[in-house]
Image (cartoon, rainbow, N blue to C red):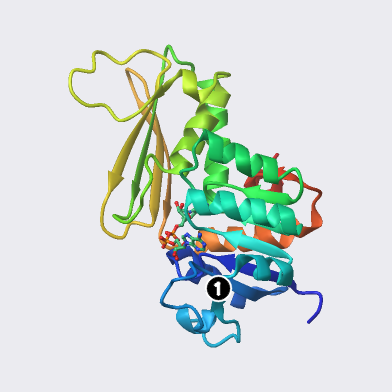
């Protein structure tokens, strides 16, 4: 049907790419209209739906991003930082909206995505699930109520053994939300993983701890610890469908927006 949003998946053979193809197939009002991965990937030429075990959809996997960007209303990118930067530039040149789930971008790479968003609407979020975006809002509120003299904030996360960046983008997002609640930039209170003779913990610090192992999809806790008690806000994803559903929701929303950089808060109306 012509009013369906045509979606293109970048990184379509990846864990998230395959889940996106399955989820789009199960969602009203959208179709997979293109599927791209690395040009030398062994799956080039295979049907993208078949590869994702979602049934044949008549969309072959290609290595040609530019051609795909002409055929879709929105590109959904869950790849690696360097690829995402190049893809955002290509989407800006083609005038195609984007949804980016890739994490681990450095400051320069993040600036390149922001610059691409001057030309096209881009939704970029380290975690697309409704639950985690709710957790971010709650974290900011609780951090605003519990001051640094009384409560220490620590962010703990665990992911599967294949994850290549740490702390997770979501953990950093939660840290940023906690810092915002206290009215300080995260950079001024950030404490990465501790090791050795660290000395006592200064008040106001926001610490991060990372666990990796097995097939854990994604678990995050924000811990508020005082001398007398502990409050823990926790989210556990048991499968990738929650991220894919959020990304597809964002991909339906993005093509209707003016150029700019948007978060899942904007998509979900949590602002
Ligand atoms: P993955 O390694 O399973 O998949 C990445 C895919 O990208 C691979 O198929 C790879 O071949 C492909 N790729 C790499 N470079 C490419 C390029 N230049 N062009 C086209 N394709 C390219 O990884 P994954 O577990 O699917 O995660 C991908 C990213 O998404 C990570 O950064 C992860 O942290 C992030 N992620 C975000 C969310 C969220 O909700 N925002 C949820 C899960 C994962």
Q: Which residue is label 1 attached to?
A: 21
Instruction: In the rendered view, tell whether residue 101 sits above or below residue 262.
Output: below
Tell me the residue at 33%/47% (across/down).
Answer: 158
Q: Nearer the viewer, residue 117 or 147?
A: 117
Quadrant of residue 14 in the image?
bottom left
Q: Which part of the image, by quadrant, shows the N terminus?
A: bottom right
Q: Is residue 251 left or right of residue 140?
A: right
* Residue in view at x 69 percent, y 66 percent: 69
SS state under label 1: helix
Q: Residue furthest left?
A: 196
- Give the camera-side residue of 30 and 72: 72
Q: Residue 194: x and y, percent?
A: 26, 26
Tell me if residue 266 can be seen. yes
Whole-percent x, y for residue 70 in the image: 73, 68
- Residue sitting at 47 percent across and 18 percent down? 188
Density class for disc 1 (Cα within 10 Å; few <14, some 14-19, many ≥20) is many
Please indicate whether residue 157 sits to the left or right of residue 2 in the image: left
């Amino acid at each position: 049907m012509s009013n369906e949003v045509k979606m293109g998946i970048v990184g379509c053979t990846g864990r998230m790419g395959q889940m996106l193809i399955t989820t789009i197939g199960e969602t009203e009002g959208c179709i997979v209209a293109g599927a791209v991965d690395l040009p030398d990937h062994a799956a080039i030429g295979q049907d993208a739906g078949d590869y994702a075990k979602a049934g044949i959809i008549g969309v072959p996997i290609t290595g040609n991003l530019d051609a795909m960007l002409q055929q879709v209303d929105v590109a959904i990118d869950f790849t690696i930082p360097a690829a995402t930067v190049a893809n955002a530039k290509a989407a800006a040149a083609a005038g195609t909206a984007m949804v980016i789930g890739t994490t681990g971008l450095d400051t320069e790479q993040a600036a390149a995505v922001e610059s691409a968003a001057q030309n096209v609407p881009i939704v970029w979020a380290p975690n697309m699930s409704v639950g985690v975006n709710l957790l971010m809002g709650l974290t900011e509120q609780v951090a605003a109520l519990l001051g640094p003299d009384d409560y220490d904030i620590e962010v703990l996360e665990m992911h599967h053994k294949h994850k290549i960046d740490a702390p997770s983008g979501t953990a950093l997002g939660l840290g940023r939300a906690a810092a915002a609640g206290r009215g300080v930039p995260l950079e001024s209170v950030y404490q990465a993983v501790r090791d050795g003779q660290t000395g006592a913990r200064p008040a106001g610090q926001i610490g991060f701890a990372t666990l990796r192992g097995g097939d854990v999809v994604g678990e995050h806790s924000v811990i508020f610890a005082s001398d007398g008690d502990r409050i823990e806000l926790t989210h556990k994803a048991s499968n990738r469908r929650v991220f894919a559903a959020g990304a597809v929701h964002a991909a339906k929303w993005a093509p209707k927006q003016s150029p700019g950089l948007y978060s899942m808060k904007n998509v979900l109306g949590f602002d």
